[in-house]
Amino acid sequence: MTDDAHRFTGMYDECRQRVWAYVVSRAGRQVADEVVSETFAIAWRRLDDVPEPALPWLLGVARNVLRDNVRAELRREAMAGELRAWVEGDVADQVTERIGVLRALAALREDDREILVLVAWHGLTPKEAAKVIGCSSAAYRVRLHRARKRLRQAMEAAGESPHEPAAERPKSRVRNLSEEWS
């Protein structure tokens, strides 16, 4: 056995249970084996970077692997949500509706578009969006109110009514976004 293999085996034998316990305490038994395996695979690839004692370093790697797994799960859920939004109702109606919203949005000034998009598409709070724009929260809220008003006008001019009764319009993600703007 090489020195690297001997060192890794000793580290694995000494730390595996404690890394597993750490992962179980953070994420449960269902993912523990996978995260521990990934943690030690990383340790093997980066064996020269593993300090003595190895346990704190291994726990940090396990924490990062868990964080990456959570991010991946969030991405999968977001994609599934997007796909569900497209299969609800008639796709042609949703595409037509989206085109109407995008046309109305394109008809606005760049400043209005940015103000609306920061909240509706990027999910920022008005306070966070105000920091991006470089103004106070109060000023941002005024600008947002005015931009929403201009979006409603642009949608009405394009023949897309943002205020149809709910029973007469299909429920879709695009409609939800346009309602956030109005």
Image (cartoon, grey):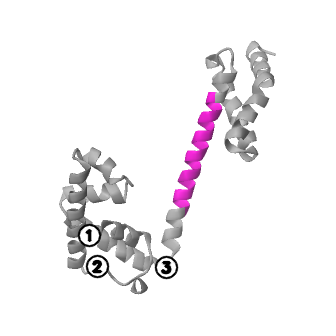
- Asked whether 21 or 67 is in front, the reply is 21
Q: Residue at x 26, y 50 (%)?
A: 137
Instruction: Name the amino acid type tagged 2.
Output: Glu
The residue carrying mark 2 is 160
In the image, residue 147 above or below residue 163: above
Where is residue 99 shown, x and y percent of the image?
Answer: 32, 72
Q: CA distance from mark 1 to mark 3?
A: 22 Å
Assess whether mark 3 and mark 1 are in contact (beta carbons under 8 angstroms). Answer: no
**Of marks 3 and 2, which one's residue comes earlier in the chain?**
3
- Does 76 lie within the magenta span? yes
Q: Residue at x 58, y 41 (%)?
A: 68
Question: Which element is circle 2 on?
Answer: loop
* In-image side of 18 versus 62 (left or right): right
The residue carrying mark 1 is 103
| Majority secondary structure in the magenta region | helix
Q: CA distance from mark 2 to mark 1?
A: 10 Å
Q: Residue 89: which numbered mark, if any?
A: 3
Where is residue 52 shown, x and y percent of the image?
Answer: 67, 14
Where is residue 30 shown, x and y percent of the image?
Answer: 74, 47
